[in-house]
Each structure stands twice: as structure tokens, then as C-alpha cells.
Amino acid sequence: MRRAATEAGATPSEPSYDGHDAQLIPAGPIVTIGGTRGRPLVADVVRRELTRLILGGEFPVGSKLPNEDRLCERFGVSRVTIREAVRGLIEDGLVVRRHGSGTYVTRRPLIRNSLDLNYSYTEHFQASGLRPGRKLVGLRTRPATDDDAEALAIDVGTPVREIRRVRTADGRPAIFSVDRIPAAILTAALDRSDYAGSLYRVLTDAGHPISHAEAILRPEVADKELARVLDVSAGTPVQQLRQVDFDVAGTPVMVSDEWHVTSIIELRVYRRGPGPVG
């Protein structure tokens, strides 16, 4: 495993930061990022509601989900929508389909984040039955490093706005993130609460709505500083996610590094297949 990075663009704390006056920002309006912009798909709404019912105990582990007709009646949607919502639950690992028998609830995770969908952590925590929170621990403008410049397709030294936040689940640190956005994009006057909230909303308001993202996942172990931020022991395994977000014009507008506490949140990929067998 790699030890959590300590270079200028990724350390959890630096003397130039204003983390001494960090404040807990209540969860506010959220932006759902999916295959299309705007309102979430009906299947996603049904999927979240079924997730809430499963985690809330209405459908306990080992129980069988109601058949499609009953679910259609309950949610007032079509069979196609129900099938898509249930497929999402299967991808999340919440249910399993048994041929000729039905669909059954499996073990409950703490939080499972499916990497095939780019969405709000606040919304995901809420759907998992946990109280979300966001804490801004660092905010500054600095010159872009070589790493930033390569990811954002800008020149080294170009001013970037760097935002450091901790996301909590029921008050427990779950994710530490370091996000960098070219400062030239952020022309509107913004205060600390704007940066503590949805950065996708900030970018949308700046005229750069997000179209898609590219991410790399790798295991690390927490060094002393990261352990302090995430309230874990030094040497604890964490999942590190590097992501670059692109706007609708295909321009990279944000690069992010995230460290996920594996005892709280599990990063998953649903793999279809198998592919061609030689």
C-alpha cells in the first residue's frame, strides 16, 4: 500500500491554512449528478426510497422484496422503472436475485458508494439512514503544481482555489477531500459556506456544469496528519480516490483527492460480464 501523500497538493494540514476557524456547515440543497443534468431519474428516486426502506428495517435482511406489480402500485411507476431501480439495488449489494424465486435483501453495509455513478455524498449518506455533515477545514488560492497543471490542462503556477473538507456520517469523519479549481472560473463573490457546500453547484453557477468524471482508486495507509483529520490510528488502511471532473464542453474544471475511511464507507464497482472468453 502507498502511504498517504504528503506533498504540497495533498497534505491534510499546512501552516497557511485557515482551519483554526473551521465550522460545521449544515447540509443544504444538493445537486444530483447522473447521466443527465436536472431532476433525478424516476428510477433513481425509487432506488433511493427502496434503499431507505431496507436500511430502515421495513424489508429486513433475508426477506423477499414485493413483486413488481406491488412495487409498481406502491410507487405509481412502470415495471421498467421498477426493474431499473432494483438493478441499482443489486449493483449496490443490497439485494440479490434468485432465479425462479425472487429478489432478497442481503446484509446491510454501513455505506456503499458505487463508483459507476457520480452523485452527492450528502444525498447518499441520507439514503443510507445516516446524518450527513460537512466541515470546511482549509481554503486558499495558490499556484498550480505540476500535478494540478497536468490534471486541469493549465500552466504551472496558474492560480487555483484549493478547498479542504471533511464529510461526516452521524458525526464521524468519513471522507477527507482536497479539491482544486482554476481560480479564473470562480468569478462570483463566494463565502466560506459556498465552498463547504456542493462544489458541483458552485461550478454550475459559474457556467461550468459537470458532464462526467474520470477517477483512479488506490489503497493507502493513513499517515499521522491524515489520521488526525479522519480520527483514525496512524497506519489505518484508507481508500484514496483521485478524480478529475469535466464540464459539458469537455474541459477539466476540478481535480480532487479523497481519502475514505474503509470502516464507514465502501467503494464498489459493479462489473458486467463476463466478456469474450478465449
Image: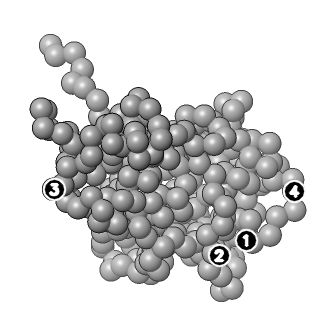
Which image quadrant: the N terminus? bottom left
* Residue 35 appearing in the image: yes
Q: Can you say whether 165 is above or below 62 in the image?
A: below
Which image quadrant: the C terminus? top left
Q: Tell me the element at label 3.
A: loop
Q: Residue 188, which numbered label? A: 4
Q: Residue at x 73, y 71 (%)?
A: 193
Amino acid residing under circle 2: Ile
Query: Marks 2 and 1, Cα distance to the nearest angstrom?
Result: 7 Å
Q: Tell me the element at label 2.
A: strand
User: Earlier along the polypeptide chain: callout 3 or callout 2?
Assistant: 2
Mark 1 surroundings within 10 Å by alpha-carbon count, few (fewer than 14), some (14 through 19), many (20 or more):
some
Residue 25 placement: quadrant = bottom right
User: Earlier along the polypeptide chain: callout 3 or callout 1?
Assistant: 3
User: Circles 2 and 1: CB distance less than 8 Å?
Assistant: yes
Q: Residue at x 58, y 71 (%)?
A: 134
In the rendered image, which residue does mark 2 sit on? Answer: 25
Q: Residue 193, which numbered label? A: 1
Q: Nearer the viewer, mark 3 or mark 4?
A: 3
Q: Is residue 234 left or right of residue 136?
A: left
User: Earlier along the polypeptide chain: callout 3 or callout 4?
Assistant: 3
Q: Residue at x 48, y 73 (%)?
A: 131
User: Circles 4 and 1: CB distance less than 8 Å?
Assistant: no
Q: Can you say whether 119 is above or below 72 in the image?
A: below
Label count reads 4
Mark 4 surroundings within 10 Å by alpha-carbon count, few (fewer than 14), some (14 through 19), many (20 or more):
few
In the rendered image, which residue does mark 3 sit on? Answer: 62
